[in-house]
Amino acid sequence: MSPGRATKGVEKVERNPENEDSARAVLASELRHLRRKSGRSLAQLADETNYDRTYLHRLETGERLSKLPVMETLDRVYGTGELLVRLWKLARLDAFKDKYRLFMQLEAKATIMQKYATVVPGLLQTEDFARVALSSSPTPISPEELEESIAARLGRQELLHRTPPPDVRIILDESALRRPAPDRKIWHEQLTRIVEVADAPHMTIQMIPFSAGLHGLMGGSLSLLWMADGSGVAYLEGNNSGDLIEDPGEVARYRLAYDRLRDAALSPPDSAAFMRQLVEDSRP
């Protein structure tokens, strides 16, 4: 997203012929329809919203996925309530692979989340840290793909602010808090974000120290999602793969492993004190 004044030029809206029935295509079509119905040109909309005309054009063709504040702004401009925000929530799922997309759909419905991570999880990442993390992938990524991935990742954080919010417990491996971003300012802001999020009444963040030794969940990240009816799923994620587990017996085994890890972790108050000290030590 590039805030700014309109870029002058002849307006030309092109349809993306791929995935015309996807939620993303529906969102793009609705954006085109609403603007035309309002009688605005792209240049006029750019001046009104302070988003670049080219960027708005690419949203209308489905070439780019916006961030939540953009859809909130456009809903206000068009007087559409939360229509575009709701469509965006569906469209952002298109940016993920099939198994992860299903996990995200379940994540959006979960009332209780329990997570273990060896790196700073997407739900806690700042935009700058997400950019660094996604840029470090061994697979080459274009600037456009990078911005797309950042928008999709940050979009997941919206579920933490829904009403009522889910009850979330995250156990961070000490390695996640000891491996800084190259830029000291970005790392300080990321640690600060974690500490701030941990203060929310529906959030619990613990740290499992190196001194706890080997444990059953080493080698990857785990998410346990519990629904209002008591059913649950587990999602195991490695560097290049993810596995969604729905079998109740297997989910129960991962829940037991998680409970043991929680018992070995620092208490929430001790974890908070540890992280606050890291924030102080990381000041630029």
Image (cartoon, rainbow, N blue to C red):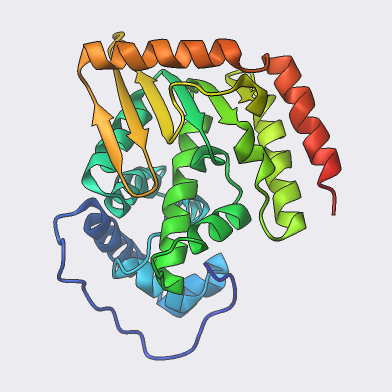
| 168 w.r.t. 191: above or below | above
Q: Nearer the viewer, residue 68 or 174?
A: 174
Residue 156 place in picture, x, y as percent:
44, 41
Q: Is residue 275 left or right of residue 151?
A: right
Residue 74 in sight: no
Q: Nearer the viewer, residue 106 or 241?
A: 241
Residue 166 place in picture, x, y as percent:
47, 21
The structure residue drawn at horizontal position 53% and vertical position 24%, both measured from the top left corner, is 214
Point out the residue furthest to the front here: 214
The structure residue drawn at horizontal position 85% and vertical position 42%, both measured from the top left corner, is 281
Residue 11 place in picture, x, y as percent:
35, 85
Which quarter of the rendered picture does the C terminus lie within?
bottom right
The structure residue drawn at horizontal position 47% and vertical position 71%, both measured from the top left corner, is 45
| 272 w.r.t. 53: above or below | above
- Snapshot quadrant of residue 173: top right
Q: Nearer the viewer, residue 104 or 161?
A: 104
| 54 w.r.t. 214: above or below | below
Q: Nearer the viewer, residue 277 or 95?
A: 277
How many labels, in total? 0
Residue 138 in sight: yes
- Snapshot quadrant of residue 279: top right
The structure residue drawn at horizontal position 38% and vertical position 22%, both measured from the top left corner, is 224
